Image (cartoon, rainbow, N blue to C red):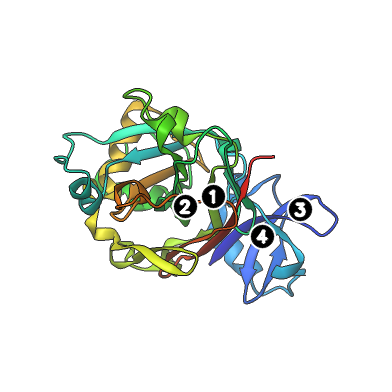
Amino acid sequence: MKLMSFRRPDGSRSWGVVKPDSVVDLGHLAPSLKHALWATSSLAEEAARHADFALDEVHFLPPIPDPDKIICVGLNYMTHIKEGGREPPPKPIIFARFANSQVGHGEKLIRPNVSETYDYEGELAVVIGRRCRHVKQADVASVIAGYACYNEGSVREWQRHSGQFTPGKNFFHSGSFGPWLATPEEVGDITQAHLITRLNGEEVQHATIDDLCFDIPTLIEYVSTFTQLEAGDVIVTGTTGGVGAYRKPPLWMKPGDTVEVEITGVGLLRNEVVAEG
């Protein structure tokens, strides 16, 4: 099952179950998708209903537009660690994104005026399905609502101002999240999924999820130890090798570019880059 958040043709916000080329509007059941994640098994029954809108009639929002937390992991693919000439970190490198730094599928990514070092980072996002704390690795399946694609657009110049990544990762509308949330039974073995990033149709990143330095169970156990996770919280698990910063010459996203992040079994997230107005 795939679940999405969107704006209806009249501009009002809603969420629902994705069908081929259409969506069943379930906004009457809960104020937003994160409030319904505990009941995904019953939501599957709603997919049998007649669709309310074609996908090209609605405006995609991030699958969880209102998360309590967006927790990101740095240097977490072995290919990315190696391309930077680093050693694997002893513990996960954690930083946060803010909700207003991201857009949904089809929305415009904004390259800020203060820097041209705007880089792509194709990533897998894990969405938490219920409140939890101190989750053991063996139990993580019980707290995962689903998966989505993420482009962790990074302004490298600002990321490198200090040892803290936060400024370069939080420019307004610099990252994207979507197109929807795919539930675990929809995806199957996520570790075998292929993560692919394309810039203007050219493949620039490609790895399987099993190249993670810290796998998903390890990340959830670690993060849930230091913070209480809530339904709808997002853990963005890191990017693979091939980022623009390590290419020669560097390959930066610029206005007019189109960037795609695709994860097999999950979906394809596409956005155009525009200049800050």
Q: Earlier in the sequence, mark 2 or mark 4?
A: 4
Q: Is residue 261 above or below residue 83?
A: below
Q: Earlier in the sequence, mark 4 or mark 3?
A: 4
- Crowding at dot 4, Cα within 10 Å, few <14 / some 14-19 / many 20+, comes out as many
Across and down, in percent, residue 206 comes to 32, 64
Q: Secondary structure at mark 1?
A: strand
The answer for how far apart the CA atoms under marks 2 and 4 are is 20 Å
The answer for how far apart the CA atoms under marks 4 and 3 are is 10 Å
Q: Earlier in the sequence, mark 3 or mark 1?
A: 3
Closest to the camera, between mark 1 and mark 4, is: 1
Determine which of the numbered discs, if any, sits on residue 176 in the image: 1
Across and down, in percent, residue 97 comes to 48, 35
Amino acid at dot 1: Ser
Which residue in the structure is indicated by mark 2?
150
Q: Secondary structure at mark 2?
A: strand
Which residue in the structure is indicated by mark 4?
16
